[in-house]
Image (cartoon, rainbow, N blue to C red):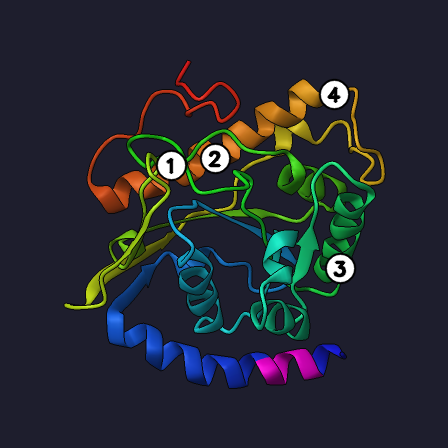
Amino acid sequence: MSRTSNRRLFRVLAGVVKPAYALVARLRWSGQEHLPAEGGFVVVPNHLTELDPLTVAITLYDNGIMPRFLAKESLFRVPGVGAVLRATGQVPVLRGTADAAAALTAARAELASGGAVVIYPEGTLTRDPGRWPMTGHTGAVRLALATGAPVVPVAHWGDQDVLDHDRATGRRTVSLFPRKDVRVRIGPPVDLGPWREEVPDLTRPAEPDAARLEEATDAVMRAVARELAVLRGTEPPAALWDRRRGARP
């Protein structure tokens, strides 16, 4: 499907999804002035609930941006959902395979055409007990360093009150009424200058400068945490929750 067709379908879906979302949530955002006026860019949000992509997509769409998500491959196998994801130009990612590199290549082409690519570095809903961002995979940073695209941190809070996930039992709870307040805060692009000396090769699964990439990714996730702290009216933790160890350093 062509890019124009993707946009048309996205507009049709927005006309259905936005009113449905508005029935259960009042969405407000700030910081839209930080969205680049031209050129491609990478969007990195926090991940609280399966409702997050709609929250982020509506925010970007209402600011004149049609987002392209790098989404878990498993979502593309969900009946109905997978067809919509493919039809709107979203990109499946199967980590640890050649498909992951192919997804970054597709994302690179989207950035080159001036599009916005949304990546969740955590790869899953946060496991931080306080719901703060965790450490992340390095794909978003690798993509930004390879293309020179800015990375825009986005934080949101409140959609977990609509659709929540109990980490202990795995059970999901839904609360549609009364309507919940959902707020989004868009931060200024993260300065990746200190890590731009060596541009990684997107086609290789492992990089010799892995520590530097993880350091840059931590800087991005801390930027997301700072924006989330403003929404929550509290200070973020001093260190990110380590998703590998399941603990805070």
Magenta span: chief secondary structure: helix
Earlier in the chain: of badge 1 and badge 3, it is 3
In whole angstroms, how far apart are the C-alphas of marks 4 and 1? Answer: 25 Å
The kind of residue on which mark 1 rests is Ala
Q: What separation in Å lies between label 1 and label 3 (alpha carbons)? A: 28 Å
**How far apart, in angstroms, are the residues tagged by discs 3 and 2?**
24 Å
Residue matched to label 4: 209
Q: Quadrant of residue 170?
A: top left
- Please name the residue that numbered disc 2 is placed on: 221
- How crowded pointer 4 is (Cα within 10 Å; few <14, some 14-19, many 20+) is rated as few
Q: Determine the CA span between mark 2 and mark 1.
A: 6 Å
User: Is the Cβ of the residue at disc 1 closer than 8 Å to that at disc 3?
Assistant: no
**Quadrant assignment, res 174:** bottom left
Q: Say which of 146 and 77 sits in front.
A: 77
Horizontal side of residue 70 vs 236, given as left or right: right
Q: What residue sits 70% from the left and 22% below the top?
A: 210
Label 1 belongs to which residue? 225
Residue 112: mark: 3
Identified by mark 2, the residue type is Met
**Is residue 212 one of those drawn in magenta?**
no
Observer able to see residue 39: no
- How many residues crowd around disc 1 within 10 Å: few (fewer than 14), some, or many (20 or more)? many
Q: Position of residue 141 (x, y in %)?
A: 64, 38
Amino acid, disc 4: Asp
Residue 62 to residue 97: above or below? below
